[in-house]
Amino acid sequence: MSRDESEPATDDQVRYDQARYVEDGQYEPLLSEKDRTRVEIGGDDDSPLPDDLTRDSLELPALSEPELARHYTRLSQMIYGIDTGPYPLGSCTMKYNPKFTEDVAALPKAAVHPDRSERSVQGSLELLYRLQDYLGRIGGMDAVTLQPPAGAAGEFVGIRVAAAYHEHNGEGHRDEVIVPESAHGTNFATAALGGYDVVSLPSDDEGRVDLEALEAALSENTAALMLTNPNTLGLFERDITEIAEMVHDVGGLLYYDGANLNALLGRARPGDMGFDVMHYNVHKTFATPHGGGGPGAGPVGVVDELAPFLPAPRVREAGDDSSGSEPTYELFDPDHTIGKVHGYQGNWLVLVKTFAYIARLGDEGLLDASATAVLNANYLASRIEYDVPYEPFHHEFVASAGDQDAADVAKRMLDYGVHPPTTKWPEIVPEALMTEPTEVESKDTLDRLAAAFNAVAEEDDETLEAAPERTAARRIDQTDAARSPQLSWHALESDES
């Protein structure tokens, strides 16, 4: 880039040249000296910030562009991500997110301010309305809210809707939620956070719901049974219609944890099994980003009886416009709504990605996704030497590390360049290796995963206990790291001193 030095620089030119225009065509480099790391800040004595949040100077790295580029490139090479390889994490599924959905979400017209009028965002409201319809038909639900910002938030909304429903019907005495032992940890937490007593339900010898134990747990105090189907062992609850009848006979509701919906996508619907309320984990089923503090999305679907209690507002058709050809859309508050649970209609751009993924795959693509998810899990399980005690499974399986420590197995797998599965859970399997390859991985990738599993299976305890050896960071104290996280380089500097 070149310019006439006699002309004042534009903002873009200043950023490009890393210089500051002074006057009369003169430019002053921001960091001209290698050892210049402190930049004086022209302060305003009347700053509205408190004194402890202001400073007179700012330390900046005095590095050249190549040094900076190489530093961050090295950091990126030290990090394992979904663009690097598979994450076979059972339950906490992390699968590749297609880039076209990112492109759609980045379109200028996708930027919608939440305070714009309904008239000016009809296209956005139509997308939300159609997504509600997509998810409702996929799950067999009559009404859907898109507001919850994550799966766990969706669980909480679902339980609060159930509580509002019981309260409205004069049954506020229902203070128990039944949760199977193999359920997601968030299910127990959600029930407790919702103010309920948690009743733990044991599994039978086949790893499914024990019907006798369920009958004993059910009572007039039962508000809901929280269930995942297939469950966390990847097993389909064959008695699901009987389970639904048992829960409904005592006046309770059946809650579906949508974590494993990708095993049933386009083939079976929770609503048809007797579930009354469910949340959708869009990162697991519909390829949006996963976790990491957000943003996420956890829409909630319900049957007709629970629709009046959903969060407000929702989107509905308002009728035809003046031309009589195009429908218009409006926001409305359900009659007995539990209120607003998130800004706008939820995490809007995540919902855009969800819609784009469903729309592009269509019915046939969704069917193929669930078929491939089940095929991949069964193929990988057939290739590894570790024992898989419970089957036939669907999209995921839980192997046992046997005499090895599952956590050591996971750390050693890192040395083979692959991400390990979820470990130590569910506890029904000793030294559990909970594995879900998802539908996006190729046969070659699954073969590499199997080779890593099998290599570790043959190694001795001394080797496992020393792992990982080839990663940027060696074995850390996980307990101390969780209780005393160091989130700034200043903390590291303090430790060294």
Image (cartoon, rainbow, N blue to C red):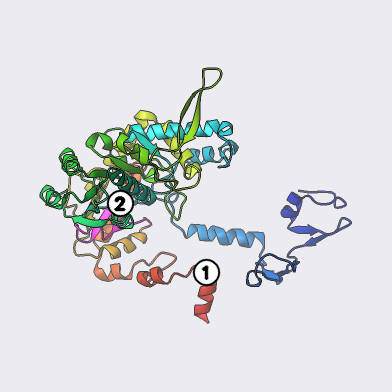
For residue 90, which numbered disc appears in the image? 2
For residue 175, which numbered disc appears in the image? none
Do callouts 1 and 2 mark residues in contact (Cβ within 8 Å)? no
* Residue picked out by circle 1: 488
Q: CA distance from mark 1 to mark 2?
A: 31 Å
From the top left corner, tell me how far across and down residue 138 is, in percent. 33, 34
Residue type at numbered disc 2: Gly
Q: Which residues are magenta?
A: 417-438
From the top left corner, tell me how far across and down residue 105 is, in percent. 52, 40
Left or right of 246, for residue 377: right
Asked which quadrant contains residue 27, the reply is: bottom right
* Residue positioned most to the left: 212
Residue at 27% in and 47% down: 396
Secondary element at tag 2: loop
Left or right of 240, for residue 489: right
The 10 Å Cα crowd at callout 2, few under 14, some 14 to 19, many 20 or more, is: many
Residue type at numbered disc 1: Ser
From the top left corner, tell me how far across and down residue 165 is, in percent. 31, 43
